[in-house]
Amino acid sequence: MKVTVTVNGSEVAADMPDRTLLVHFVRDVAGLTGTNVGCDTSSCGACTVLLDGRSVKSCTVLAAQADGREVVTVEGLADGAGEMHPVQAAFRAEHALQCGFCTPGMVMASVSLLAENPAPTEDEVRSALEGNLCRCTGYHNIVRAVLAAAADRQAASGS
Amino acid sequence: MSILGTRVVRTEDPRLLTAGGTYVDDVKAPELQGAARVTFVRSPIAHALITGIDASAALAAPGVIAVLTVADLTDLPAPPPPPEEGADDAGAGAEGAPLPLGGHWSEPLFAVDRVRYVGEVVAMVLTDDRYQGEDAAELVSVDYEPLPAVVGFDAALADETLLFPPAGSNVAVTSGIPADDAAFADCEVVVEHTLVNQRLAPVPLEGRAAAAAWKDGRLTVWVSTQNAQLGRFILAGLLGLDPAAIRVIAPDVGGGFGAKIALDRDALLVAWAAKHTGRPVRWAETRSENLVGMTHGRAQRHIVKIGGNRDGRILAYRLDIVQDTGAYPRMGGFLPFLTGLMAAGPYDIAHVSTGRQVVVTNTTPISAYRGAGRPEATAAIERAVDLFAAEIGMDPSEVRRINLVPPDKFPFSSPCGPVYDTGEYVAALDKVLAGAGYSELRAEQARRRERGDLVQLGIGLSSYVEITAADANGGETAQLIVHPDGTATVYTGSSAHGQGHHTAWAMLVENELGIDMAKVTVVHGDTDLIPMGVGTYASRSLQLGGIAVHKAAVEVKEQARRVAAEMLEASEADLELDTERGAWQVRGDPASSRTWGEVAGHAGDAGLTASVNYTEGQPTFPFGSHVAVAEVDTETGKARLVRHVTVDDAGTVLNPVLAEGQRHGGIAQGVAQALLEEMIYDADGNPVTGTLVDYAIVTAAELPSFELLTSETPATINPLGFKGIGEAGTIGATPATQNAVIDAVSHLGVRHIDMPLTPARVWAAISEAREGR
């Protein structure tokens, strides 16, 4: 079937088998390989993208279900001038990534979390990221990065 | 001011954060244009004879290019012949025997006439796209004649069913020395216990992956590995090619944890298939495939026996190890040797000995997993010390303090063989106890016990010493070039897969030469650019690969001094390098300065370059102490880690940001072993935890933030004082957490609970203890 998805602001259209997963549409059709596949049971969250602004695991969404909708991947987060999104910047400042494989999904999940809850507690961050697995960092610095990004935004909006 | 020891964020991150890394499945090299997808057909049965393979239905399916089996392996050079019947099995039984053992125990690329574990490769399907591959693989019909499965230590040792009938036993290696009861004769107290260090799955977030192209007599292989050079060496031998005809590239690698050392058979087959069919191929395993196809770790059973006096002094310790090495003795055959090497832990015990057996079972092969034999050694003795402390009624911190190797005994010769280089073991223990507020924790525990709270508090300790760069003599390579534009390039034989080598190596160059690290490019993992290298594992990179970079920088500096002296018409002795500005000058005359670019430009064809192959004569021995604080719900058995405080001393720290990251990750994996993770098989050898829904990989929600304390006791073997930090967290955290949970319920009469400390196990232990009273 023919599917048309707006990916990071650009329209991408292709004819593909009905069963094509959104993650393979993003990787193979749109050519954006920042989004990774880390499992086959919707457990790891490495494939997390924003679908109409909300985080989804793109390995568990058919490309057909995204037809006519808007997808944002990690490649689409930085602004036009190439400035990193505050969550990306916080991940770097806090050393919240090592091998980088879970990172795109982890960043997208964190962006989605902060959109829903701009000032989360540590427990809320840990609970919200339970569906995103990281094997390198022990989550310590990921949690710190999300809290730092939230604090920075609170400070910026307060000033 | 020197950049060493300062907090520097990583140079790797902007790319990883904004575009994502380029892992094997992301590689878009022109050679891989039109690559076929590889899908493996794996055995669904633990132990069986193969009586037939029919690929006709698969070959007729859409998109199928080929179905390959052992019958197609006609173009490989003959492997070495098996040993004569009755001959000594390729050194089996000898210390440090070459592994995998080969001979009777050798592992085929494709299963030949028998499968020995669920997940073993039987055939591979090449298709135009990945979905077609999954469909077609299901159509390959394999006839199996099931055999009884050997699962678990006792079934293996019983030798009723043999995995390798010509070997005559399931015991592949027996080593160590016989138990000596005389050592325990003078002990007032002797405690003995059986402990299981359970099987774990490494689960790097990127599974195994490989892509390969054969063109004009040259093979290019992209593979998710911890050492491209070793991969090239193995491929050359397997395929009968000149190593120069093979290029192995490790692109970004999404974690390894020891399970990506060299190349698995699956990756070898991918490379072979490209050459065999002439078509580029690529493979990235699924997670379900990964959980049975990638090697597992740990899987040891221990019998610990510890003896001493009621004043707390430990006099004798015996550790008997059975290593389940899975279906084929890969590196798993070597792990108990490492466990035995470190069996004595950080203690000064007069009599320590180990006995070791390696057995095969119908399960996924065992290999290195973060720590590789050393976490097992630490878990065994740290449980034993707690059992001993409980028996004599002394606080476990006090027993440790009495028995830790005192600072005036270094270098310390362990009765197990190694010489511990430098250490401040008692200071590390005291520091972590103070940092955790140990006496207040004990007071809170007493209050909860007094009140009979449902949620009890446990405090667990672990003191450890570990061996890093155990193969220090293997060394590591580095080449450094300073270019006429003032930039520098480092080619390293180390192979980063998350550790931050690119940042660390650039810091080392800046430190020595004053070239801004932003101008230093680090290259790794490409055998065309770096033919010789060893790789990243065993916490070896900084102390070998990093020191190699440092030594190369020192050499380049001396070259530059000669060139600059010529340029400035001054004597070499009068020249100085201003590392703040990165410029050469006549001493005290900044006006005379020449930049690195100018000096490199003047150096002529030889340029400014140095190649170093750095070896260390001996390994190093990091150490530390951990305190874990756990809460246990005594009604449900649910244990929760609420604090984890550590001192991990790995010598001089180059970049605290990176060192802390290594500690965090290790702690999480260590805690996960204690509380959550286990790869489980049923009695027929079927994996019960074969997906991430069933295998309980630790999440953010199950962990607290960690409390890290600093301690730096420099190594003396290398000029910058480095030891390895990659595995310390895993080694220290597991026993501390296990001890904490057991401590929380010890007043109820519980002495020991095997890992993982799931609610069911903790609840059962509490119930048993209550009934026993």
Image (cartoon, coloured by chain):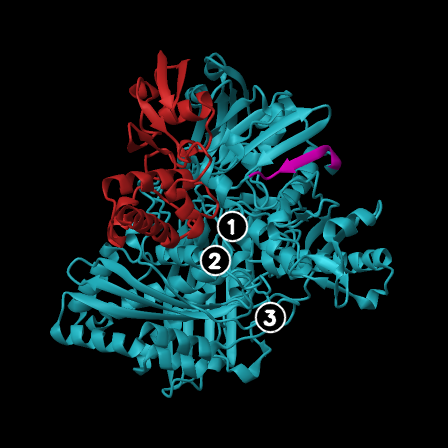
Chain colours: A red, B cyan
What amino acid type should be assigned to the residue bearing mark 3? Ala
Q: Looking at the rendered structure, which numbered label has been put on residue A123? A: none
Real-space Cα separation, disc 1 to disc 3, in angstroms:
25 Å
| Label 1 with label 3: CB-CB less than 8 Å | no
Among numbered discs 3 and 2, the one appearing first in the sequence: 2
Based on the picture, tell me whether residue A49 belongs to the magenta stretch.
Answer: no
Q: Which residue is mark 2?
A: B657
Q: Residues within 10 Å of mark 3 (few under 14, many from 20)?
A: many
Using the rendered image, report if marks 3 and 2 lie on a common chain. yes
Residue B624 vs B216, above or below: the answer is: below
Q: Please name which of the two marks, 1 or 3, marks the residue nearer to the observer.
A: 1
Taking the image as drawn, is residue B73 in sight? no
Q: From this viewpoint, which residue is outermost toward the left?
A: B451
Q: Please name which of the two marks, 3 or 2, marks the residue nearer to the observer.
A: 2
Query: Residue A125: horizontal and vertical position, in percent?
Result: 28, 49
Compare residues B408 and A8 and report the one nearer the observer.
A8
Real-space Cα separation, disc 1 to disc 2, in angstroms:
9 Å
